[in-house]
Image (cartoon, rainbow, N blue to C red):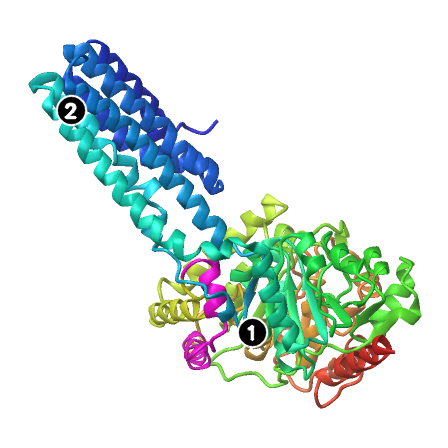
Amino acid sequence: MKKLPLAVATLPLALLGMFVTAVVPSGWAYAVCAAAAYGAEPGAMKRVTGRMQPLPRVGLSVAAASALRGASALALLARAGQGESGAFVLAVLGFLVVQALRLGYAGLLLYVWWCRRLPAVTRNVDLSALRIPDAPPRRLMDLHRGPLTFVDLPLVAGAAVAAEAGARWAAGGAGAAVLAALVAVVLLAVPAWRSRHLAAKGRVLAAVRAEVQEYEPEVVVYFSGNLRSAYQLNGWLPVLERTRHRVVIVLREREMLPRLDVTTRPVVCLPLGKDLAAFELPSARVALFAANAANNTHLLRMPQFRSVYIGHGDSDKPTSFNPFTKVYDEVWVAGPEGRERYARSGVGVADTDIVEVGRPALWPITTTTAAAPQPTVLYAPTWEGFHGDEGAATSLTTMGPALVRALLARQPRIRLLYRPHPLTGTLDRRAKAAHDEILTLIKAANGGVGEDDARLERLAARLEALRQPGGDEAQAARDSARPVADWDTVFAAWQDAYWADGTRHRVTAGSRPGLYDCFNHADVLIADVSGVVTDFLAADKPYAVTNPAGLDPDVFRGRYPAAAAGHVLGPDLVGLEEFLDRAGSAPDPLAAERAQLRARLLGPAEADPLAPFERALDALLRRAAG
């Protein structure tokens, strides 16, 4: 059982003490209890409300403690024999006015929040027609959690002093409290007035729709999912940037927008299904889906679209032949193995519905390795997943820390790049514990903070400031239509700083650096069964696939074709040293097998990996138009 936080325990006891000392009465004892209540309230309210929406949060902080404190102050005055005085009447009126003003502030706060919570949140869409004003200052919107908590302090303090020194103090305190509350309401009324036109949600939605329609998108890229799954869409953004087709990205979770990497393509987030249904895009005929999600059905039921499942990786895991993909008109896979995978699975996807498009995002991958003082090993375990396939499970829980220890202890020394899956530890505590242990091992091996770490943090903060416009979601949507100035320059500086020290071990989580950038800086890969292995074939470098279940190597390669041209590494790590020694030797004994496997898994090599994808999109758009 968790220990009760001190503030949460103190607040009710202090409020009770205020009533007890008011009944006694004792002005000075009452003042001590009041001080304890005021001191405990901010922490208690923050703890109790957490991430609750504004209505319950405002209701708790405005109504409860304030009303109890005011009532106790009036009780103190009455018990002190001042109930018949004019000052007492003024104190009562002041108490009522303060409560009314605090409730007025709460109403204005909710109104501003409602006005500025757009029904369609955007990036890279011109919203000038909506005349969105700047977001109210954060401090003003948070008064209920800070200064407004103490707005009745003059009234309570005046009552405490009045109980000992005369009724006039109560009237003065009440007047000061009313003035403070009135200032807060007036300050918030200004942004409420300026944002009032955004309360017409239908007009806002129509304005966004008109702007997107003017762009005349041909293709909708639809994405919905868990907030930690943003990487699934982010992996496609470079492809969407390069395609010559007009693309609009449609999201369903507004919290996904801050997790989206930088893109110049229009992005529209439509949280409500009814708004999605009303968001007509007559020029669009094709919808691409990067993940299987329940919300996909909201767009799939619209007959104007030819639906295509493009996925977010091509691998031997069961997620790459999910039966749900039967609902799409077409399923696009990388190479012949993707087609055969569906045929073997028997999940019901017709061969005629499968199109081989290669892996269009692979153009940044080079077959040479960036210069470094020592060999570099990239370890990329997958997450624990839902699929239940023991052979394709994460290696973290069975061999991850042991593998990292062996790599860090290797002589001659190597540099380790550890790239955990974004969802690591979300389903299995053992995976989270193994991940944390690996982080500790790497930190110890690095021997503390590097010279470039402080510079990296500064550059990362600048990138984040450039990526995310300031203010609330309405202001961010408004400002995102402007070009992201200096992004390329700052990002290049961050890249240089990140890779400057070729001896330092790195944890490469997130989209900076990208997976393919890690490929280019690695000499060899050690990975679980996943799309990482398939994509690494484009680098034409040695790799090992982990076999955490300890299956027979021949059985393992037969079950997971991507391992056919690599070393199979069991949980006992037997052969690890041999693999690393052989990987640095020439000639490469598995080069020919990798070339054959690459064609099978990724399709025929082309000068531009985007070309097959573009041809497939052209053909589908022609069919959709016919």
In the image, taking residue 563 as reference, residue 250 lies left or right, namely left
Tell me which label, 1 or 2, sits earlier in the chain: 2
Task: Find numbered disc 1 in the image and state the secondary structure of the residue it sits on.
Answer: loop
- Mark 2 sits on what residue? 170
**Prevalent SS, magenta region:** helix
Q: Residue at x 80, y 58 (%)?
A: 301
Residue 298 in percent (x, y) is at 74, 55
Residue under label 1, please give it: 263
Residue lying at 32% horizontally and 22% vertically, measured from the top left:
68
Single out the mark in the foreground, 1 or 2: 2
Viewport quadrant of the C terminus? bottom right
**What element does badge 2 sit on?**
helix
Residue at 50% across, 84% down:
371
Instruction: Give residue 83's quadrant in the image.
Output: top left
Q: Is residue 596 visible?
A: no
The magenta span reads: 471-498
Q: Amino acid at mark 1?
A: Thr
Q: CA distance from mark 1 to mark 2?
A: 60 Å
Asked if residue 26 lies in the magenta stretch, the reply is no
Residue 159 can be seen in this image: yes
Above or below for 436 versus 460 = above
Q: Nearer the viewer, residue 216 or 539?
A: 216
- Determine if the magenta segment contains residue 495: yes
Write down the quadrant of residue 36 in the picture: top left
Q: How many marks?
A: 2
569 versus 34 height, above or below: below
Q: Residue furthest bottom?
A: 607
